[in-house]
Amino acid sequence: MAGHAADTVIVNARKAYRVIALCLLNDSYSDSVTKVVEGYVRHSFPGHWATTDKAAETLPASHSQFLLNEPSMFSDGSFPIGYFCEKPEGALDEFGERIIDLIILGAGNGVASMEVAIIEVEVSGRFIDISGDKEKDHLDPMEDWQDFGKLARSDKDIDGVMFSGSVYEEDDPIWYAAFAVDAIILSDEPNAIYQLKWDQGEFLGYTETTSL
């Protein structure tokens, strides 16, 4: 990708994490008020995908983001992408804040809780590193981030984008936006289980409960 060679970095088996609804691991569908949230993040295929593709059907839950063509920070929805955080705490906080609107939709403004699993993976590949400079021209304004992601993905030598979790806070965790399924390898570590809580449309935090 012309003009960004100096920003690329080789990532070699770095640990990273993502949060998924527990139903992705045990194939259960909760009857709780948060079922609308579990439905949103549930492992599924876009309608135009051929579900007879065995390679896609057998992707583990850790890779389920690669099955969803939905708009996100670096994708306009024309291609799937996987997001993973260098810290479990960052992944939990991001998940809890990101789905507040869905929690309100499913539970109103009352108290809601949801069990999730922390999935550990290893990330490898060549990534464009924009984590250390939040004032780069190609990330300002924010509306251009999806276009930047499309441009980065068009370069076959690039496996993803490294970025900071927020443009407003210091010491943010590093995130990996991976374009390629094979850039992510599922770790053998047991999945830690947490209970997330919300009240009055506010994310209250999380508590570790057990491990699978």
Image (cartoon, helix red, strand yellow):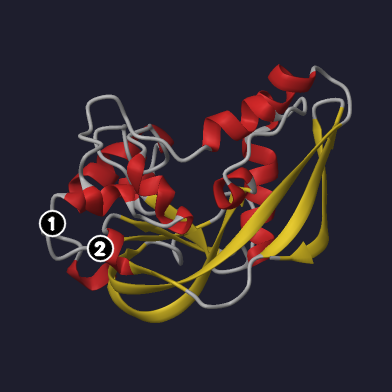
The kind of residue on which mark 1 rests is Asp
In this orientation, which residue lies closer to the viewer: 37 or 200?
A: 37
SS label for mark 2: loop
Residue at x 37%, y 32% (from the top left corner): 70
For the residues marked 2 and 1, what is the alpha-carbon distance in whole angstroms? 9 Å
The spot of residue 139 in percent (x, y) is 37, 46
**Foreground residue among 1 and 87:** 87
Image position of 184 (left or right of 79):
right
* Residue topped by disc 1: 155
The quadrant the N terminus occupies is bottom left
Across and down, in percent, residue 163 comes to: 44, 59
Mark 2 Cα shell of 10 Å, populated few (<14), some (14-19), many (≥20): many
In the rendered structure, the answer to whether residue 35 lies left or right of residue 122 reads right
> Which residue shows up at 36% across the image and 38% down it?
68
Residue at the disc numbered 2: 159
Q: Residue at x 31, y 32 (%)?
A: 77
